[in-house]
Amino acid sequence: MKYVICGGTGFIGSELTKYWLQAGNEIAIVGRNLPKDAPYHPKLSYHTWDSLHADSTPVENADALVNLAGASLSQRWSQSGKKAIMQSRLWAVSAAAKLLARLKHKPSVVIQASAVAIYGTSLQATFYESSPAHVMDFPSDVVKTWEEASDEAYKNIRMIKLRTGVVLGNRNGAFPKMKLPYLLGFGGNIGTGNQWVSWIHLTDIVRLIDFCIQNPTISGPVNATAPHPVTNEEFGRTIGKVYNRPHWFPLPAILLKTAVGELSEILLKGQRVLPTAALEQGFNFTFPTLQSALEDLKRQK
């Protein structure tokens, strides 16, 4: 099969590329610029939006398009930072839609990145794909606007809105930063520790993307989270257990807010999200529990 990945050199995109290449698929990665020192593979090609605007032939006859492009939320939320985060996501959706419109032979499905932030935050509620969007902060506003743009952009094509939680991997993403205090001997609760962390192992989100593409009955929102979310305290204690480190040194909310400003909302607030759509369609998580996920990441090091 042939796949187009927008944002294919990022954290999830790189792992997805490796997964599909190992299965013998052809991959076309699209970005604003060509990557430096890109690894060679006979079935892997790199393209810019500008080059495909001039000639879209290299991505004709693709079976699916995966759009993971967008600036990271993990930056200080200054006014310029917020603008860049929002605009990068909307620009990527628009660019992908324009690319699809130029194709003579379009893919049958689009996987569009989204996030569980669309549900807002809560210490008590549990959220499913059927739960309404609740704009209550910057992340929820970004994701709601992002999904509305996607609904408008991808007409007459099956689309999955992949609502991701915290993706756990060793090389990038949030986990190396979450693990570091424990490795230094200073791990503990962030704030009260009662906030929920809806997480997923990197292996499982890659498998879930592939699963959604291969199952034509799946469309609309899909929560990309493991079936057993945990509180921040449980998350930290599990890191301590797996890595044989103490869980004892709490990080007060006021210090985190002082250090990173409004960005602290990501760590101090959360939501309990369940992957109902994936489970109902028969998806089996390789790492359904946090301990199994962290033990695997430890083995990889």
Image: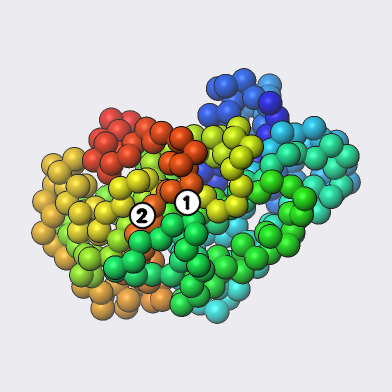
Residue at 26% in and 78% down: 254
Quadrant occupied by the C terminus: top left
Which quadrant would residue 63 be assigned to in this image? top right
Mark 2 Cα shell of 10 Å, populated few (<14), some (14-19), many (≥20): many
Residue 82, which numbered label? Answer: none
Which quadrant would residue 16 be assigned to in this image? top right
Front in this rendered view, residue 113 or 174: 113
Q: CA distance from mark 1 to mark 2?
A: 10 Å
Task: Pick whichever of labels 1 and 2 is earlier in the sequence.
Answer: 2
Residue at 74% in and 47% down: 157
* Amino acid carrying mark 2 in the image: Ser
Q: Which type of secondary structure does the marked residue at label 2 adopt?
A: loop
Front in this rendered view, residue 31 or 69: 69
Q: Position of residue 107 (x, y in %)?
A: 75, 39
Can you see residue 138?
no
Q: Position of residue 272 (x, y in %)?
A: 34, 59
Is the image coloured rainbow, by chain, by secondary structure, or in one colour?
rainbow
Mark 1 Cα shell of 10 Å, populated few (<14), some (14-19), many (≥20): many
The residue tagged 2 is: 198
- Given contact means CB atoms under 8 Å apart, are the residues at marks 1 and 2 in contact? yes
Quadrant occupied by the N terminus: top right
Q: Position of residue 271 (x, y in %)?
A: 36, 63
Q: Which type of secondary structure does the marked residue at label 1 adopt?
A: strand
Question: In this image, 185 relative to 173: left or right?
Answer: left
Residue 162 against residue 142 in the figure, above or below: above
Residue at 69% in and 42% down: 109
The residue tagged 1 is: 223
Question: In this image, 202 relative to 209: left or right?
Answer: left
